[in-house]
Amino acid sequence: MTTSTSSQSLWQRVTAPLSSGPAAYGFLALYVLACSVLLLTNPRTELSTDIVFVLFMLSMLVAYRSRVAGWFKVVLGVVALGVVLPYFGTLNPFYIDVATQAGIFTALALGLNVVVGFAGLLDLGYVAFFAVGAYAWGIFSTPQISEINPAWGPVDPVMFYPFLIIGLILGLITGVLLGLPVLRLRGDYLAIVTLGFGEVIRVVANNLDRPINITNGSQGIRAIERPPLIIVDQIRNLGIVADDNRLYQLFFYYLVLIIVLLTVIVVARLKHSRIGRAWEAIREDEVAAVAQGIPRVRMKLMAFAIGASFAGVMGVVFASKQLFINPPTFDLLRSINILAMVILGGMGSIPGAMLGAIIVTMLDLQILPRIAAVLREAQAAGAPIPRQFDPTQYQRLLFGLLLVVMMIFRPEGLWPDERRREEQHEVEIADEELEADKAAK
Amino acid sequence: MALLEATNITKIFGGLVAVNDVTFTVEPGSIVSVIGPNGAGKTTFFNVLTGIYKPDKGRVVFAGQDITGWRSDQIAALGMRRTFQNIRLFGNMTVLENVLIGMHVHLHASIWSIIFRGRTMVREEAKARNKALELLSFVGIADKRDELAKNLPYGDQRRLEIARAMAGDPKIILLDEPTAGMNPHETAEATQLIRRLRDERGITVILIEHDMRLVMSISERISVLDYGSKIAEGDVQAIRTNPRVIEAYLGKGAAGQAA
């Protein structure tokens, strides 16, 4: 305890002058500028770029937390995420893809955070709602639809946009359908049922190719349509030469960015409303909350459905971006991964969930594979690593270890909600008092 | 017409008859107490009235509606609020937020209004905040509105629980041992507050209490429970001299000596 407070005060001593006043403006501008220059001058795919890239993404969260004027944050955000990052993406398309993935999972983590963090309902099958959205667009935009009824043909790709709303509604409906029977359960029981539900959706997708071929079973759905690019001709007229794939990468990047922005706004507003307060009350003390007239099941259902609807929208985007989906895309590990993002970032905390999503996605797609690659090179170069040891096999182990270490040393998450931090510390203090009592005896 | 009418309430846990055929009426605008030795079934009776337990037998009629078997939140929304014997505040929320939670049933901003920061929502929130502040000053802790509820001293936590209960504009408030663990000075203040609830706000009060001085000074009617049954009912004078009540509290024989 004493060590953690003193290290915290040291941290604060370093960051306090930089988080407010004119120094903060300079620091943030310099930070973003430095990262941008480093990225744009060295767009190769290697570990150092990875690290700068992570720092670059982090700059947005640092800016969010600093006490600077709102317009300055907006300008920084627009410059960094709206201009620098996409431009960097044209130099090295790998990173724009990573950023898009991180965005997709940020929205998912924010959605799951409503369920787990705000309302305190442990949902282990969250990816099911994601799958529903993805399969909806996958089936309706491809000739797969004709398998269901030969008279039907795939919808026009421009229908992608209304399908974002349809995905939202489908997620919502699925959330309510699952929630209605199970939300009377509490804690562990709820977790098990949602876990089962997640698996059921995957297994259904895997087996619904007979008697009527709806999902094309384990082979998945291929050649999923992308929406037509609306302003592509104008861009070409400007003299910018870019092939379709590049343009689509940028398109999906911006689309995801917009959806994440909307998600953050919606989630933050809900949190600070009568609904958010009711969720928090239910999480803290269900009996007392109900005694204040809060309808328990209805509020929980609302949390479940709202969380699910974000996943539904992102499912549509994901299917269209990936062009291909199959049942293993939506397995339990995916749900656990999203949950890990929420917990790693800090349950109930909006910047926490975003940070968690970015870090886990980076680890998954970039940093861990890179470390494995570096180790393999060293192995090939004759470093004393046994030949049977295959570093790529150990990525998940490293990830797991990281989680364990995090939970031991920072159980409240990387960027906890202020209140949640208190809850954690309460437990610690109580523990210490117990220890002190024992020592006294 | 009676505000609250509980008829022949029975609640059984396994082999234990916690509340046995209790009939209980409360007139609007009154302060009534339910007393009895520990384990007499007082809190269980409260839990039946507020819908936490469903009665095995009997009916509860409140404000002209048969609320037997209703859910807790429905009963609370109809205007019956309570405090808890072992204080159940939302400890990690601020004092003000606790009161706002109590107002939940009166806030109607739609989800769209919340997402788009609609005028109804903004205005409603501002109004709710003002009302919450007014309630906090009524119970005397307005200056602590931004503290976390769990950091309040004990007496203030009791006050906050009452303010939270008042936030729903209840017709009736059930107070479960509101002065438990208080010193005489704090008890006197609490007594004052309970009286003001009725006199200034017109809220009917039912009280479970062990402090006999408080009970005798404030109640207009008293019901006595023992082993789950109602053994006596009447005004202060009648209860004070009732031999069965003295027996329940002091044991057999005491009644004879007292008389």
Image (tube, rainbow, N blue to C red):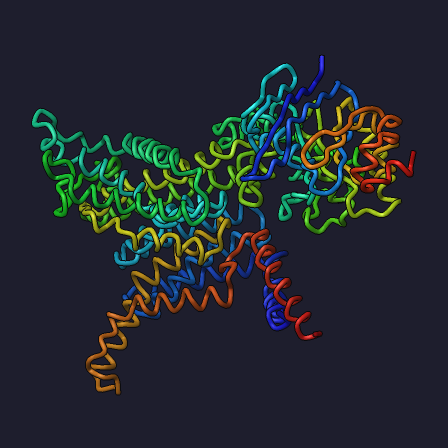
**Number of marks:** 0
- Residue B231, compared with residue A223, is above or below; it is above
Across and down, in percent, residue A319 comes to 23, 43
Please say if A328 is above or below A429.
above
Answer yes or no: is residue A82 visible. Answer: no
Residues A176 and A340: in front is A176
Measured as percent of width and height from the top left, residue A406 is found at 46, 65
- The answer to whether residue B148 is left or right of residue A321 is right
**Going by the image, does B188 lie left or right of A259?**
right
* Of the pair A128 and A188, the residue shown nearer to us: A188
Picture quadrant of residue B75? top right
Q: Is residue A301 left or right of residue B15?
A: left
Residue positioned 79% across, 42% down in the render: B179
Which quadrant is the C terminus of chain A positioned in?
Answer: bottom right
Looking at the figure, which quarter contains the N terminus of chain A? bottom right
Does residue A339 appear in this view? yes
**Image quarter for residue A14?**
bottom right
Query: Who's the residue at 34% across and 57% down the image?
Result: A361
Q: Where residue B27 appears, x then y in whole percent? A: 75, 18
Q: Position of residue A365 (x, y in %)?
A: 29, 61
Determine the residue located farthest toward the top in the rendered image: B1
Residue B29 lies, with reference to residue A263, above or below; the image says: above
Considering depth in this image, is A265 or B7 the residue closer to the camera? B7
